[in-house]
């Protein structure tokens, strides 16, 4: 899968893309990430990418010309989506990550900065995406989150792909509690059922923990899960 990041700060991605699962996925050619700087497409000697907003106001706005030129310089695969990182967009969630991982060959990700981006850039965009209801200094952090969330779902990135099936949000529920050795630590013991060797009882306990944890911590998810009829084991 190909990821094209349009960013004024390509160095931001250097360390994350060379570390952990992302670095391994790129080394194994499961995915390819290309960084494009809009400054490279400016025509003035100062490589200026922003200007004052029409109508006045505080802050600067990213100009349309370098963004259009940067996007139009990229190869275009058949199954492509052009995403703009913005707090006004659709909030990222696991279902979106799964859709992108399964149904797309190329994601072009625009990282905004300053006060905003010229509205005409939206004619290039197929989806606006947000990390949450807050404002950051730029779109690089949301873009990195998106990269991580999608790339880890690509076949071959995670060593044991079955582990993806029992994670938070995969079945509409949060994940169950995890324990490892030692069986007792500072007076806290591992639940006895996990030491029993009875895989049926362990599976049922984990499911019950998922339901209870979701109900307690994310009642919004719990209600959605019940309304969808997923909770037929309760």
Image: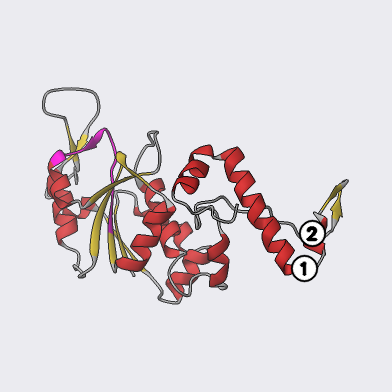
Foreground: 203 or 189? Answer: 203
Name the residue at 40% across, 33% down.
134
59 horizontally vs 206: left or right: left
Label 1: state its secondary structure: loop
Crowd class of label 1 (few under 14; some 14 to 19; many from 20; radius 10 Å): few
Crowd class of label 2 (few under 14; some 14 to 19; many from 20; radius 10 Å): some
Foreground: 33 or 157? Answer: 157
Question: Mark 1 or mark 2: which comes first in sequence?
Answer: 2
| Residue that label 2 marks | 193
Name the residue at 19% across, 64% down.
74
105 horizontally vs 71: left or right: right
> For the magenta stretch, what is the residue range?
108-119
Foreground: 226 or 74? Answer: 226
Quarter of the N terminus within the rendering = bottom left
46 horizontally vs 144: left or right: left
- State the image coordinates of residue 188 (x, y, percent, origin top left): 84, 47
205 horizontally vs 112: left or right: right
Name the residue at 52% across, 43% down.
222
Q: CA distance from mark 1 to mark 2?
A: 8 Å
Q: Is 187 situated above or below 162?
A: above
- State the image coordinates of residue 41 (x, y, percent, origin top left): 16, 54
Name the residue at 13% across, 48% down.
123
Q: Is residue 68 visible?
A: yes
- State the image coordinates of residue 44 (x, y, percent, origin top left): 12, 46
Label 2: state its secondary structure: helix
Q: Which mark is residue 198?
A: 1
């Amino acid at each position: 899968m190909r990821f094209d990041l349009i960013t004024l700060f390509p160095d931001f991605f250097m360390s994350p893309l060379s570390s952990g699962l992302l670095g391994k996925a790129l080394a194994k050619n499961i995915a390819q990430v290309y960084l494009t700087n809009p400054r490279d497409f400016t025509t003035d000697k100062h490589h200026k990418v922003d200007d004052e907003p029409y109508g006045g106001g505080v802050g600067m706005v990213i100009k349309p010309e370098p963004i259009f030129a940067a996007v139009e310089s990229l190869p275009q695969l058949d199954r492509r989506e052009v995403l703009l990182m913005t707090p006004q967009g659709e909030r990222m969630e696991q279902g979106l990550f799964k859709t992108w991982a399964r149904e797309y060959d190329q994601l072009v990700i625009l990282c905004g900065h300053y006060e905003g981006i010229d509205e005409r850039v939206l004619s290039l965009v197929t989806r606006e995406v947000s990390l949450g209801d807050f404002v950051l200094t730029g779109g690089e952090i949301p873009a990195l989150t998106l990269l991580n969330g999608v790339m880890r779902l690509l076949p071959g990135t995670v060593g044991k792909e079955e582990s993806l099936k029992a994670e938070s949000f995969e079945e509409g529920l949060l994940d169950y509690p995890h324990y490892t050795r030692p069986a007792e630590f500072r007076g806290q013991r591992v639940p006895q059922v996990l030491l029993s060797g009875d895989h049926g009882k362990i599976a049922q306990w984990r499911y019950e923990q998922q339901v209870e944890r979701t109900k307690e911590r994310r009642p919004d998810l719990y209600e959605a899960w019940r309304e969808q009829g997923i909770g037929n084991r309760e």
